[in-house]
Amino acid sequence: MKTAGRGPASREDRAMKIGFIGLGNMGAPMAANLAKAGHEVTGFDVAGVSVDGVAPAGSAPEAASGADVVITMLPNGDILRVVAAEVVPAMQAGAVLCDCSTVDVESAQAAAAMAAAAGVGALDAPVSGGTGGAAGGTLTFMVGGDEASFAKVKPLFDIMGQKAVHCGAAGAGQSAKICNNMILGISMIAVCEGFNLADRLGLSREAMFDVVSTSSGSCWSINTYCPAPGVGPTSPADNDYKPGFAAELMLKDLKLSQQAADAAGAATPMGAAATALYDAFVAEGGQGKDFSAMLLRLAEMSKG
Ligand code: NAD
């Protein structure tokens, strides 16, 4: 019982009862993969979505009642707090509330505290890998929470993803996600600035890619997800910057990084600059484009 498309749950891996709340772009394929692997999944979404193999519930508490694990995949921390307050009282003792949304660290910790007060386990388990990873069962989970809850949900992470890293106590998963995506936002801008300067200096993009991708400037943003079309591996740049990872989702994560940096008193001047650049980009035409389209934005911002 591992990834999408595998057969039903084996006898060693007991089929679990799973409540799945938030069946959007990410949640729907994740829930479908759990059902396909032989688990008994009951789902709820305020939008009334229906998902193959997932039994529809009339409310979030109905989906949570009697479940071994309740998974949430929601837009933000405020909604997570509301949903957690609804579902925790409906959960059985010993069950685990596993939030896979990307939210602020405080909301993750607030959901964990609600669960602990009710004798329910909790994990914050945001993902990387996007909708392709959700459909293919190849997500990476960054997980905060207690060891016993992690061990209980691990077989489900193994179906929905290819890697689950237990990062520490409640909030640690969100902390890891926020730090990673702040680095990603900054490094994408840095690579785009490099290409923009190279263009202005008359350096070919091919030469720029060949040198940097094998030199000390190499990083995921250029080697794997090159923002310049026609060079390097195929990336959203080669598909008219269709996301991929949309600029507005990068902005959401950068804002969470700045909220966390403020709360923790951490100096993140490059994170702040990246947030401001994506904020302006999203407000002025970047919405719905891949975050690597920052290259087009920088070209527009350049003189002459
Ligand atoms: P989405 O907007 O497609 O899905 C969210 C779903 O939650 C919607 O279907 C909505 O109707 C539902 N919902 C809202 N309030 C609800 C409530 N009170 N009860 C039940 N359902 C409710 O978003 P998504 O792209 O699936 O992203 C979900 C989370 O995953 C977000 O936190 C996002 O930041 C994170 N994430 C997304 C991606 C991506 O590429 N889309 C990648 C990594 C992480």
Image: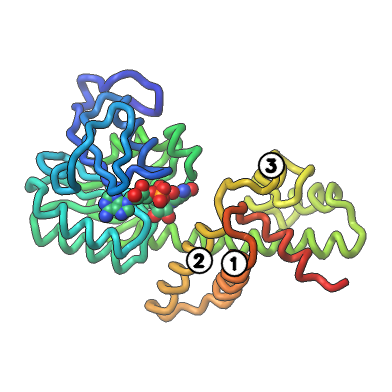
Name the residue at 31% across, 57% down: 168
| Element type where label 1 sits in the image | helix
- Rendered position, 181 above or below 223: below
Residue linked to disc 1: 278
SS assignment at label 3:
helix
Three-letter code for the amino acid on which mark 2 is drawn: Leu
Where is 60 relative to 156, above or below? below
Q: Which residue is mark 2?
A: 254
Say which label, 2 or 1, has the lower sequence index: 2
Kind of residue sitting beneath label 3 = Asn
**Distance from Cα at disc 3 to Cα at disc 1:** 20 Å
Q: Which residue in the structure is indicated by mark 3?
A: 239
* Circles 2 and 1 in contact, beta carbons < 8 Å: yes
CA gap between label 3 and label 2 equals 24 Å
Residue 156 location, x and y as percent? Answer: 29, 36
Residue 13: x percent and y percent? 23, 26
- Can you tell which quarter of the image residue 63 is in? top left
- Label 3 crowd bin: few (<14), some (14–19), many (20+), radius 10 Å: few
Q: Decide: few, some or many residues near mark 2? Use Cα within 10 Å; few <14, some 14-19, many ≥20.
A: many
